[in-house]
Image (spheres, helix red, strand yellow):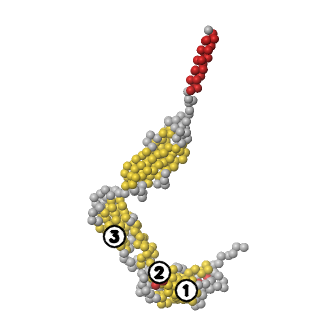
Amino acid sequence: MQRVKALLFLAAAVAAGSCFAQQPEATHAPRIVCAEPVFNFGEMDSSKDVVHTFVLRNEGDLSLEIGRIRPSCGCTVASISQNTVPPGGQAEVTTRLSLRGRQGEQHKTISVESNDPKQPTLVLSLEGTAVEEIRIQPNQLFFGRITTDSAITGSVIITIQNTNSVNITKTSSNTSNLTVSTESTPDGKSVRVLIATCPPLSRGTLRGNVRVETDHPKYPSADIAVSAFVVGDLTFAPEELLVVASPGQTPARFVLVRSETGKKFEITKVEVPIPSMTYNITPVDAGGYQVEVGGIPPTVEVEGKSLRIQTDLPGAADIVIPFRFVPATPSVQ
C-alpha cells in the first residue's frame, strides 16, 4: 500500500511539473501603438500645407525609446514631443506636408523607429489630393534680350478653379517701364494679363513685379515677376581690357562689336589712349567686327585709360572700354 501511495505521489508531482513547464514565462517590453496611423486630409489647395499630429502610446510595461523619425521625402517634416515614453504614457508626432507645386493624389509616409522588439518601425501616413485652385501660366515672364527701344507685349493667363468667373479689381506695376492691361477669356473663367515694356529702357537687367488684385476672398491678389536683359543697338565684349604686368612684352587684346537688331553698320573711328598702341578691324559673322588692339604697354601706364570706338549706327553711343592694370604676382621661393 505504501508503495502504491508513493507511486501516485510521484506521478502527481511529475504531472504538476509538466504543467508548470508548459506555462510561458512572463516577458517585459515596450509596445508602440498608434490608434490612427493613416491621416486622410481629403482635397486641399496646392498652395497650402497639411499639418497633422499623430498620437503614439506605450502599451508595454517598459519605457519606450523613440529613435529616428524619417519622412519619405523632403516635402514632409516631422518632430516628436518626447523621445522617452513611460508605460501607459503617450507622445505626439507633429507632421507638416508642403503641397506647393504638387497636383493629384498624394501618399507620404513617416517611419518611426523605437525599441519595441515586435514592431521596431512604425509607419505613419498622410494621404489626400492636392488641388490647384488658382493657376498662373506662366508664373513669371522673361522677355529675353531686348534693346532699349523695344516695345513688346507678353501675356499671362490667370484661372481660379471652381468659380464661374474671375473679377479683376486692380492691376499695378512697381516700375514705369511696364504697363498692364487685362482682358477676359470667352468663357469668363480666366483673365489674360497683358504686360508690355515701355521704352526707353535702361541698359542692364530689367526687373519688375506686376500685381493683379481680385474680389475673390481666398485669392485677393497674385504677383507676376517680369524680367529682361536690355542691351543697346550695339553690344560689345569684354567690358574692360585687363593688362597683366609682363616686362618686355607688348600684349594684344580683342574687342567684339555686334548689332543686336541686325542693322548694318561700320566702325568709323577707333581712338587708342597711348600713341604706341595699334588697332586692326576685321569683319566677323552676323554683321559684327573684331577690333584687335596691339602694342599695349604692360605697365601701370594703362591704368585709368580707355579705348573708344565710334560707329555710323544712328543713335548709337560711342563704345568706351576701360583698361585695368594687374600687377604681377610675387613668386614664392
Whichever of labels 1 and 2 marks the residue nearer the N terminus, that label is 2
Pick whichever, 69 or 328, lies toward us: 69
Q: Is residue 319 visible?
A: no
Give x and y (percent) for residue 20: 57, 24
Residue positioned 61% across, 11% down in the render: 4
Task: State whether residue 141 is above or below residue 233.
Answer: above
Which class describes the residues within 10 Å of circle 3: few (<14), some (14-19), or many (20+)? some
Which structural element holds mark 3?
Answer: strand
- Mark 1 sits on what residue? 292
Mark 1–mark 2 distance (CA, rounded to whole Å): 16 Å
Query: Is residue 228 shown above or below 139?
Result: below
How far across and how far down the image is residue 65, in percent?
Answer: 55, 41
Label 1 element class: strand
Asked if the residue at tag 2 contacts the one at tag 1, i.e. Cβ–Cβ closer than 8 Å, the answer is: no
Q: Which mark is residue 125?
A: none
User: 187 or 327: which is nearer to us?
Assistant: 187
Residue furthest to the top in view is 1
Q: Residue at position x 60%, y 17% from top?
A: 11
Q: Position of residue 322 (x, y in %)?
A: 54, 82
Q: Quadrant of the C terminus?
A: bottom right
- Residue denoted by label 2: 235
The amino acid at mark 2 is: Thr
Give amino acid for label 3: Leu
Is 244 on the left-hand or right-hand side of 75?
right
The residue drawn where x is 42% and y is 76% is 146
> Going from the N terminus, do you reach mark 1 or mark 3 first?
3
Residue 293 is drawn in which quadrant?
bottom right
- Residue indicated by mark 3: 194
The residue at the far right in this view is 333
Q: Earlier in the sequence, mark 2 or mark 3?
A: 3
Q: Where residue 164 appears, x then y in whole percent?
A: 28, 58
Of the residues shown, which amino acid type is indicated by label 1? Glu
